[in-house]
Amino acid sequence: MGILTGPETRVIVQGITGRVGAGFARRLAGFGTRIVGGVTPGKGGAEVDGLPVFDSCHDAVARTGADTSFVVVPPAAALDAVYEAVDAGIRLMVLYIENVPVLDALRLTRHARARGAVVLGPNSAGCITAGGVALSEVDPRFLLAGRIGVVCKSGAMCAESATYLKEAGLGVSTVVSIGGDHVLGTHHADVLRLFEADPDTDAVVLIGEIGGRSELEAAFAVAQMTKPVIATIIGGSAPEGRQMGHPGARTGEVEEGAAHKRRVLAQAGAVLTADVTEVGRAMRGALESRASKRGNRP
Amino acid sequence: MLLDDAESTALLAGKGALPADAATRALGDAGADGTLAISLDRDRRGHVVRLARIAGAGIAGSRIAGARIDGAGIDGSRLAHFVEPATALPGFLARRAAQYLGYSGEAAQLSARALAASYALVLDDAFSVEARLCQGRITGARVVLDATARFRHPEWAPYGERLEGTAEEAPFRRIGAVACVPDPGAKIVAVLSGAGLMMTTLDMLTARGARVRCVIDMQGLPLQGVEGMAPIFELVGRMKPAVTLIGGRFMAPVAHDFAAAVIAANRKAPLTGQVITWLAGNRAEDGQILFAEAGFRRVDDYPAAIAATVSAGA
């Protein structure tokens, strides 16, 4: 059933009474995700599309058994929203919101990790398990269900990867966007380890980008994996020091550049492609090569 | 938000650091003992204090400036210390820093104040802080404030709008998009939905030999319809591109709305040169029809759209 979520996942939307929050609650429920309510302080007792609104995460968890939160509060409220969710026992939070202050992102991610909770983002497009739980704006009908895990920073690259895998006849298990901000709750390596342990995932596509060292940390995980990893790093042609859409996508030190990351990932055993459009073909090749070594078909 | 020397020094002074006095100013840049910098360590989720013994250059010429505080001092040395947010700035670090810079007595006390002030500033939403020290006093500084924290800092209002980027890039920030101009003399512009596509498109165009004037991530502007798209078209139009690639893959059912907004924006601020459109995702077929009816060149496959752009721009 993929990683991070499962059939029992029960989701609340923090910020459900806002325009974006209500829209997401509606869309995610429409995808079949079990949305059990929402939280907006001061609006407890209200309803949004028949979903109960609670004043606090504690109320929401106590009344609905929620274990996951889709967070779409204003950036100024993100820090407290995560503190509250973690304190209430929420185990997975998708921070779809962007423009969270760096210091707040640093504090909320450390707080969640120290308590064993998973934060995707800030600035994450969420995660989606094909045929399972959708915590993303990606419409699951566009995904082919299968056994390839995908981890990217960018939501657009998640969609592109799934598309080119589908064109190669390969489906996805779970697609994870870890977010494009400077400080992230979850790094590529964290997701790789989950995919390695997941019996429903046979191989992984990793899309990295310039800026930060998440991909270098990922190389250590790749080196220890038994499953094939197809990787690419985007932003290699960006001028030095220039921000490329994501706040965290800019080169500073040499290790943060695409060339170095590609080299380190290749040394760790990943198969590097020139760009995202080649990941399907490369994955097909890697699986066939693996199968032929084992004497069976992929 | 990059602050200038005077603004940065004043902020540090407000946190307790002592700026240069007449005696240290008289020594000039050559009298500088070293540079103290505190920056974000995004991967370890904390901050790093770095010191380098550097002399002979003003703060503007620093090798460890701004976003890339990575250099070593002129003698090849550098002191780096990761600060755990839970423990905050440890007391011993001030003594270690003073020792590294060769300070004792009053200079050591002053450098400790400079270090404490710098850390206080990062805990007050500075993205990075850099200060040049002479006898423990600050002779120059550069502070970058985290613009996303602006909402809780009314005292930052006097700094006004500090948009990142070159003269061509900054106006895109003003309207809510992000642009990168790798080659101001080139004739290809690409307008994409999403940071990932922005980067990938630049990579793919460059790998195929094209020179790219500008790539743009529209951010959330397509969701605002023509009101969001028209300002992008106005700015792109000023570049007078020979070829403009416009595209995106929309997983929410908005691809046709995007196409309609592009067409309306082009009526309002028509682009010169050839316009190539690529549209994929939820309700893309409807949008593709709109593009074709509007007379745009329509390429429905991303790599083919890249190839068409390269070819048209050759």
Image (spheres, coloured by chain):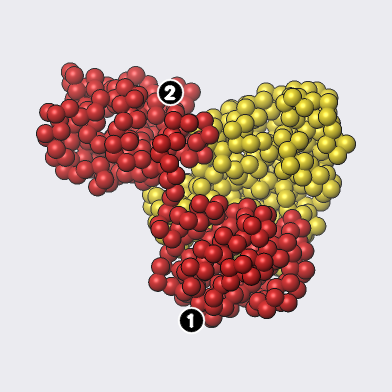
For image coordinates 80% across by 30% down, the residue present is: A53
Mark 2: which amino acid?
Ala
Residue A298 visible within the image: no
| Residue highlighted by disc 2 | B88
Identify the mark nearer the N-term, 1 or 2: 2
Q: Is residue A268 left or right of residue B100?
A: right
A125 or B12: which is nearer to us?
B12
Chain of the residue displaying label 2 = B
Query: In front: mark 1 or mark 2?
Result: 1
Which image quadrant is residue B57 in? top left
Q: Secondary structure at mark 1?
A: loop
Q: Which mark is residue B314?
A: 1
Residue A136, can we see it? yes
Relative to residue A203, is residue B134 drawn left or right? left
Residue at (59% x, 50% y) in the render: A153
Q: Judge by depth and name the residue closer to the eye, A54 or A175.
A: A54
> Is residue A125 shown above or below B86?
below
- Which chain is yellow in the rendering? A
Circle 2 packing at 10 Å, graded few (<14), some (14-19), many (20+), is some
